[in-house]
Each structure stands twice: as structure tokens, then as C-alpha cells.
Image (cartoon, rainbow, N blue to C red):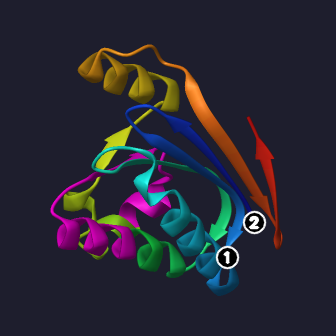
Amino acid sequence: MRIETIRYLPCTVVRASGELDHAGRVRFSACINEIWDWSDGPVLVFDLGDLDFFDSSIIGVLGMAMQRMEEQGGGRIIVVRPSEHLLSVLRLTDLLSHVELRDSVEETVAELMTQTERPPRPVARLVMRGCGRESHG
């Protein structure tokens, strides 16, 4: 599983690709905890369209983020390019009513930028592969 995060002023984009299973869930949750305060709210934009496989761990990851947002009194979860299977899982678990859906990361970031009236430039980028981390700036 590969996890890539890009920090923008109004949001953090989290892209996941490969296979998300139990081991991946632990890494994915740790990544979310690490980037939690990168944006106000926070506003987390999940691009999960390149996941080849996921099990119920995806629900655990999104559910953990939603619960933390509720406990802290705010935030937004935006899911970009969800597969039909993911949409079905979100419906069945009633998580669909707690996330926003979008078609494009770029359009989502641009929309959020117009709401904050700041230029759309990335602030930081973190790529997590395997057990190691690689930082891009």
C-alpha cells in the first residue's frame, strides 16, 4: 500500500493506492494522526480511486477520522473518485451521510481555496511506502 499526503492551506489530500487490509489500516490510521492538524477543521480529502483492494479496514479508518472530528467539534471528510463498491460499503454502514463526495482532487482543492481566498499551492508533501517514509517539499 502506498499513502501520499499533500498539504494545502485549506485541506490535506490523502491518496491511497494498492491494497488496504488490516496491516494497511494501521499505517493509514497512523498517517491520518500524523497529519491531523495540517488544515483547519481539519479538512481531509481522501483520494481512494486507486485502491486495488480494500476490506472492512476502510470503514475503520474513515470511522476513526469521523469519530475524532465529532469529539473535537468539527472537520470535514471529502472522498474523491469513490468506486461503486466503496459507495455501496459507505451506504451499508451509514457513513455516506457523513462524507462529501467529489469527482476531482484538483476541483475540490480549487473550491476550498475560493472559500479561503488563498492561492492553491501545496505546502508540504509526505509519501509513505512500506515501513519507511519519504518527504518531498
Q: Is residue 104 above or below residue 37?
A: above
- Residue for point 27% across, 49% down: 41
Per the rendered image, the range of residues in magenta is: 63-88
Q: Earlier in the sequence, mark 1 or mark 2?
A: 2
- Determine if the magenta segment contains residue 87: yes
**How many callouts does the rendering have?**
2
Q: Is residue 40 left or right of residue 21?
A: left
The furthest residue to the left: 73
Q: Look at the numbered discs 1 and 2 and tell me whether their residues touch, using CB distance below 8 Å.
A: yes
- Determine if the magenta segment contains residue 94: no
Report helix, strand or loop for mark 1: helix
Which residue position holds label 1? 24
User: Considering depth in this image, is 53 or 123 the residue closer to the camera?
Assistant: 123
- Residue for point 67% across, 76% down: 24
Q: Is residue 11 left or right of residue 105?
A: left
Q: Give the x, y percent position of residue 33.
A: 49, 68
Q: Is residue 3 above or below residue 123?
A: below
Q: Is residue 56 left or right of residue 137?
A: left
Report helix, strand or loop for mark 2: loop
Q: Give the x, y percent position of residue 57.
A: 52, 80
Which residue position holds label 2? 1
Measure how far apart labels 1 and 2 are at the Cα level: 6 Å
- Report the amino acid beneath label 1: Gly
Q: On the rendered image, what quadrant is the C terminus found in?
A: top right
